[in-house]
Amino acid sequence: MSESRISLFLVPTPIGNLKDITLRAIEVLKTVDIILAEDTRTSGILLKHLEISRPLQSYHIFNEHKAVEKLVERMRKGEVFALVSDAGTPAISDPGFLLVREVLSAGLEVQCLPGPTAFVPALVNSGLPNDRFVFEGFLPHKKGRKTRIDSLQEETRTLIFYESPHRLIKTLEQLGEAFGADRQACVSRELSKLHEENVRGSLAELIEYYESNPLKGEIVLVVAGKEEKKETREERQASKMEKWNKSE
Ligand code: SAM
């Protein structure tokens, strides 16, 4: 799809280290008609740093339902927009999905640029299997929280959660009750920033660690899936080998 036919670009921005902006992200942000931003002040600072001066318009969860129709109308008339969030990839635990869906159903085209997002480095840093994984985003804070956790008890794929630091211990305890306290996990904190830290261990060990090392900053929690029967993993490995052999 040629870039000239795109009405909406989703542009990932750094999750900490400003050097993680891509050359293409800068190019797209310099050429669109309008940049939609979750927080115009936060994005304004980044854009100033990148010497980009395009008009900024606010787009966040509190106005997105109202804003979408007007935005799509403007795209129909030929205006090209970029959507950025405060950090990372728009629409990943951030506003964007609604706009993408409406732009597509209006017969227009969207393109999400590859770029920074917190869950990929957290998953890879964890050292847990990453051939199959489930991104759970934020758990519900109250209603539905236990039901959601219980629904993951039989999940064999690696689980990824976004969590706030002040809720981490409670989450580790609740996951420990549901999955068993010896389940392996990793807490990635301040990814790409000066004080990045990846702490690996069982849920019980992580609780002990964070009880004596109070947590600050942004975090991603990665938890091993339920252990599969040995044969199942071996069988999968064997069928992978078979496929490779056939393709050679
Ligand atoms: N759109 C973003 C993305 O692509 O990852 C996620 C936005 S969500 C509102 C914010 C959450 O992402 C934080 O609460 C934290 O769980 C995670 N996060 C963002 N930046 C991070 C960082 N530098 N280190 C660890 N986690 C981070």
Image (cartoon, grey):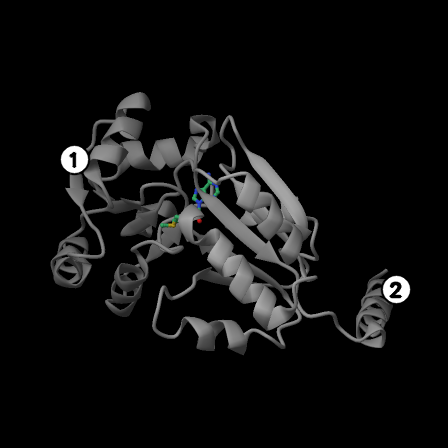
Q: On the image, numbered disc 1 is attached to which residue?
A: 55
Residue type at mark 2 is Asn
Q: Position of residue 153 (x, y in %)?
A: 60, 75
Nearer to us in this view, 235 or 204: 204
Residue ID at (66%, 71%): 156
Which circle, 1 or 2, is nearer the viewer?
A: 1
Query: Crowding at label 2, few (<14), some or many (≥20) Cα neighbours within 10 Å?
Result: few
Q: Are marks 1 and 2 in contact (CB under 8 Å)?
A: no
**Residue 155, quarter of the rendered image:** bottom right
Q: Residues within 10 Å of mark 1 (few under 14, many from 20)?
A: few
Residue nearest the viewer, comparing 95 with 35? 95
Drawn side of residue 119 relative to residue 74, left or right: right
Between marks 1 and 2, how big is the CA–CA gap? 54 Å
Q: Position of residue 95 (x, y in %)?
A: 29, 55
Quarter of the figure with the C terminus: bottom right
In the image, residue 127 sits, relative to residue 46, either above or below, namely below
For this orientation, the residue located farthest to the front is 212
Name the residue at 42% across, 64% down: 139
- Using residue 189 as the reference point, say whether residue 123 is left or right of it: right
Tell me the element at label 2. helix
Q: Compare residues 80 and 2 and report the one nearer the observer.
A: 80
Residue 116 x, y percent position in the rendering: 47, 41
Q: Which residue is mark 2?
A: 245
Confirm whether residue 121 shows in the render.
no
Which type of secondary structure does the marked residue at label 1 adopt? Answer: loop
Q: Is residue 63 visible?
A: yes
Q: What amino acid is labelled 1 in the image?
A: Pro
Q: Is residue 195 left or right of residue 224?
A: left
Against 186, is 104 above or below?
Answer: below
